[in-house]
Image (spheres, rainbow, N blue to C red):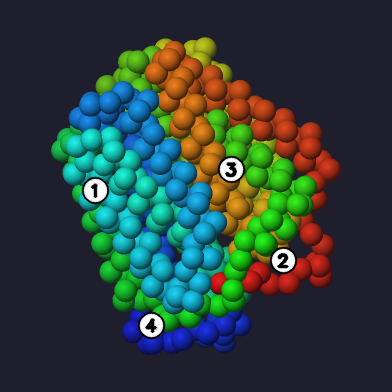
C-alpha cells in the first residue's frame, strides 16, 4: 500500500475506469468492512436478545420478533431505491449517512420503552442495511483496480462472517451480563468506529450515471432472474422463520440456560464462518449446487430439531450444522445472480437485496405467528418445509436455467 489514507482521500475517482489507474484504497475498503460488520451485527442481535426484549417492552415474543420484520421490509425498499434517490450525491456522503443510521438505530433501540419505538429503531437500521448492501460492491469497484476487486470483496465479506460468528453468542452473553439495552449501546459504538474510519479514508466518489426503475423491470422479465429471486424468498424465509426464534426453541425444548444458548449460538456462527468457505468452493463449480446443498441441509437439520430437539447434544450439533449450511447460501445466490446478469450487475444486486429482505420479513412474520400459536416447534417445522421446497425447486427448474452468460455477451456493470 503506497498511498497514505489522507492522500487517497483527496483523490477524485470520477469514473470506474479511473480505479484501474490508481493504487488500491485499502483503508477505505477496510472502512466499508467495518460498516458491514456493524450493520450485520445489529441485524442479528434480536435473535439472541428476543426474550428479554419482549419482556422489557411488554409484548409477546412473536410481536417483538417483528423488529426483524421491520428491518427487512424497509431494507428491501432501501435496497431498490438508494441508488435512485441519492443520484447526484457523492457516494462517500451516502455511505456516511447509511452508517449514521446504524448509530441512530442502535441508540433508539437501547432507549425503547414501547414496541413502536423499537420498530422505529429497526426501520432506521433497515434503511442503512438495505442501502449499504445495494451499493457496497459498486463502491468497492471504484476504490480498487478491477484486478483487486475479488480481494476487496473477500475482505468486505469477512466482516459479514465475523458478525455472523460473534453477534448472536456475544449478544446473548452480554445481554445476560449487562442487559440487552447495553448491547445496543455497544452496537452504536461499533457504528461510531466505522463512521470515523470512513470519514478518514473514503475518497471523493462523484455520482455516476442516472439509474431508473426500468432496468429493474427489464431484469424481472428474464426467467433465470425470476428463478433466483423465488428461490431466495422461499429458502431464506424458511431459514429466518427458524433462526429468528431459535432462542425460544432452545429455552423451551432442550431447556438450555442462557450460558448454554450462547455456546450453541457460537457453534452456529462458527459453522457459518466455515460454511462461507466451503460454499465458495462449491460455487467455483456451480452456484446452483451451493444453493441446493445449503437449503437441503438446513431442511434436514430442521427436521432433526423438530423430531429430536429435546436432546441437548442433538440440538447443539443440529444448530451448528444449520449455521454451516446457511453459510453457503448468500455466496451461492449472489454468484448465481451475477453470472446470469453481468450486464446489469448493480441493478440485479438491488433485486437480490430486496428479495433477501422480503424473505427475512416473511420468515419473521410466519415464524412469529407459528411461535405464538403453536410454540417454537411450529417455526422449526416451517423452516424445514420451506428450505426443502427451495432445494427441490432449484434442482428441478434450475436445470433449464443458465448459470453463466457466455463471455463477450456482456459488458462491465454500470456503477452509479
Residue 56 % position (x, y) = 20, 30
Residue at 76% in and 52% down: 222
Q: Quadrant of the C terminus?
A: bottom right
Residue at 33% in and 41% down: 119
Query: Residues under labels 4 and 2: Cα distance?
Result: 30 Å
Graded by Cα atoms within 10 Å as few (under 14), some (14 to 19) or many (20 or more), the crowding at tag 2 reads: some
According to the image, label 1 marks what residue? 108
Residue 367 % position (x, y) = 47, 26
Choose between 2 and 296: the one closer to the eye: 296
According to the image, label 4 marks what residue? 9
Tag 2 or tag 1, which sits nearer the N-term? Answer: 1
Q: Which label belongs to residue 329?
A: 3
Residue 400 % position (x, y) = 84, 43
Graded by Cα atoms within 10 Å as few (under 14), some (14 to 19) or many (20 or more), the crowding at tag 3 reads: many
Tag 3 or tag 1, which sits nearer the N-term? Answer: 1
Can you say whether 203 is above or below 110 in the image? below
Graded by Cα atoms within 10 Å as few (under 14), some (14 to 19) or many (20 or more), the crowding at tag 4 reads: many
Residue at 65% in and 27% down: 388
Q: Secondary structure at mark 1?
A: helix
Choose between 130 and 392: the one closer to the eye: 130
Discs 4/1, front: 1
Tag 3 or tag 4, which sits nearer the N-term? Answer: 4
Query: Residues under labels 4 and 3: Cα distance?
Result: 35 Å
Tag 2 or tag 4, which sits nearer the N-term? Answer: 4
Graded by Cα atoms within 10 Å as few (under 14), some (14 to 19) or many (20 or more), the crowding at tag 1 reads: many
Regarding residue 376, the answer to whether it shows in the image is no
Q: Which label belongs to residue 343?
A: 2
Amino acid at each position: 500500500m503506497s498511498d497514505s489514507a489522507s492522500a487517497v482521500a483527496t483523490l477524485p475517482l470520477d469514473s470506474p475506469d479511473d480505479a484501474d489507474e490508481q493504487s488500491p484504497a485499502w483503508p477505505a475498503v477496510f472502512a466499508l468492512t467495518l460498516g458491514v460488520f456493524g450493520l450485520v451485527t445489529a441485524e442479528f442481535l434480536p435473535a439472541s436478545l428476543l426474550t428479554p426484549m419482549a419482556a422489557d417492552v411488554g409484548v409477546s415474543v412473536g410481536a417483538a420478533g417483528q423488529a426483524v420484520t421491520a428491518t427487512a421490509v424497509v431494507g428491501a425498499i432501501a435496497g431498490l431505491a438508494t441508488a435512485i434517490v441519492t443520484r447526484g450525491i457523492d457516494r462517500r456522503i451516502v455511505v456516511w449517512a447509511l452508517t449514521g443510521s446504524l448509530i441512530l438505530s442502535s441508540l433508539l433501540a437501547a432507549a425503547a420503552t414501547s414496541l413502536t419505538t423499537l420498530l422505529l429503531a429497526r426501520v432506521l437500521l433497515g434503511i442503512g442495511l438495505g442501502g449499504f448492501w445495494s451499493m457496497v460492491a459498486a463502491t468497492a469497484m471504484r476504490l480498487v483496480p478491477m484486478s483487486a476487486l475479488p480481494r476487496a470483496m473477500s475482505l468486505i465479506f469477512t466482516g459479514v462472517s465475523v458478525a455472523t460468528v460473534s453477534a448472536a453468542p456475544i449478544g446473548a452473553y452480554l445481554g445476560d451480563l449487562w442487559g440487552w439495552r447495553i448491547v445496543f449501546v455497544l452496537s452504536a459504538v461499533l457504528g461510531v468506529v466505522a463512521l470515523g474510519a470512513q470519514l478518514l479514508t473514503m475518497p471523493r466518489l462523484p455520482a455516476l450515471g442516472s439509474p431508473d426503475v426500468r432496468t429493474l423491470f427489464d431484469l424481472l422479465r428474464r426467467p433465470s432472474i425470476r428463478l433466483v429471486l423465488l428461490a431466495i424468498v422461499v429458502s431464506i424465509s424458511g431459514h429466518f422463520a427458524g433462526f429468528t426464534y431459535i432462542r425460544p426453541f432452545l429455552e423451551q425444548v432442550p431447556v438450555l440456560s442462557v450460558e448454554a444458548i450462547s455456546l450453541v449460538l457460537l457453534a452456529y456462527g462458527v459453522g457459518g464462518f466455515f460454511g462461507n468457505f466451503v460454499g465458495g468452493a462449491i460455487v467455483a463449480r456451480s452456484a446452483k449446487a451451493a444453493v441446493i446443498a445449503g437449503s437441503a441441509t438446513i431442511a434436514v437439520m430442521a427436521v432433526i430439531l423438530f423430531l429430536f430437539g429435546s436432546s441437548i447434544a442433538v440440538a447443539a450439533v443440529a444448530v451448528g450444522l444449520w449455521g454451516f449450511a446457511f453459510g453457503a447460501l448468500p455466496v451461492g445466490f449472489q454468484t448465481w445472480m451475477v453470472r446470469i446478469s453481468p450486464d446489469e450487475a448493480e441493478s440485479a444486486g438491488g433485486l437480490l437485496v430486496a428479495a433477501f429482505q422480503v424473505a427475512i420479513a416473511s420468515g419473521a412474520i410466519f415464524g412469529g405467528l407459528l411461535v405464538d400459536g403453536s410454540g417454537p416447534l411450529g417455526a422449526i417445522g416451517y423452516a424445514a418445509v420451506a428450505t426443502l421446497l427451495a432445494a427441490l425447486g432449484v434442482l428441478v427448474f434450475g436445470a433449464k436455467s443458465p448459470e453463466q452468460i457466455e463471455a463477450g455477451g456482456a459488458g462491465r456493470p454500470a456503477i452509479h
